[in-house]
Image: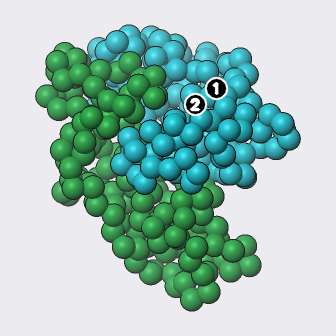
Amino acid sequence: VETTEYSRLAGHKFPRGEYTLQGHVAWLWSDSIMAEPSTEVMNPTLGHYVALHGAGVSIGEIIELMGGDPATGGGSMLGRVEVEFSGALRVGTTYLIESEIVKVDRKRGKRVGPFDRLEFVARVNEKESGQQVLESTNTWVFIRKEEQ
Amino acid sequence: MRDINGVQVGERLEAAVVESVDRQRMKTLAALYDDPNPIHFDIPGTEAAGMGDQLILQGAASIAIWLEPAIRWAGHPEAVRKYDVRLLGNVFAEDRVEATGSVAEVDVDAGTVTVELASKVGEREIAQGTAVLGLG
């Protein structure tokens, strides 16, 4: 594991986001991921979605921060996701989301060559009660083909 | 919801199968996700990115398929208290994905069961990890 020019992004905090989960979004999300669509029962992957989308950070912004072109994907892939719930997501509830980049480092794979890993953490709290509902950690991988 | 009493370490979860990954759903997901990466919605853009000639399923959808055996076994999606998954390979449009799992740990006092889950396309590994289910 090495540092990279993008390791300076570690500690970068994004502005706090506010997000209200709407019924049609929950339904469409579950349908799109080929799960049972519902406006009442939340698929666990919605935790990942609310944490990222609600944080107001787009995948395109993450790609740009890592020097890539969002229009081509910048060689990015989602590599790992951890989500821990301490409460339940509900349609109609407003959430506040705090997020930051925790770590960026570089590794080398036998097959893909050098790649950078960016770890992003978001904490989702109910706006009204202040109670934390979940914490989500995403690790994106950025293949650095040009350096092979 | 499944009763934790009687759950045994090593118990197999019924497999969940998506017979053919639907590219139209990928496009809806790209819009919801605000994901500009063309590999999820535009075949010429996927080819230009050097990623082959088929749309590639979003990681979140691969995770959902990987989690499905645990959700069905527990009896409710909101039984999932925690999941930790590594994505190891791409799923392409029209792929057949199979997810399997087994019970790794039972904590009756905490009311939780930890399951190990894996998904594959043929022999190709797609996702691996664990989920903690609250059954108390």
Q: Residue at x 54, y 84 (%)?
A: B7
Horizontal and vertical percent position of residue A27: 48, 43
Q: Which colour scheme is used?
A: by chain
Task: State the residue in front, A47 or A146.
Answer: A47
Colour given to chain A in the rendered image: cyan
Inspect this view and state whether residue B102 appears.
yes
| Viewer-proximal residue among B9 and B55 | B55
Q: Is mark 1 on a helix, strand or loop?
A: loop
**Residue at image coords 21%, 26%:** B51
* Callout 1 amino acid: Ala
Say left or right for A145 vs B31. Answer: left
Residue A109 visible in the displayed image:
no
Q: Circle 2 is placed at which residue position? A: A52
Classify residue B114 by image quadrant: bottom right
Q: Position of residue B62 (x, y in %)?
A: 37, 46
| Relative height, residue A112 to residue B81 (above, below) | above
Closest to the observer: A24 or B7?
A24
Q: Which mark is residue A55?
A: 1
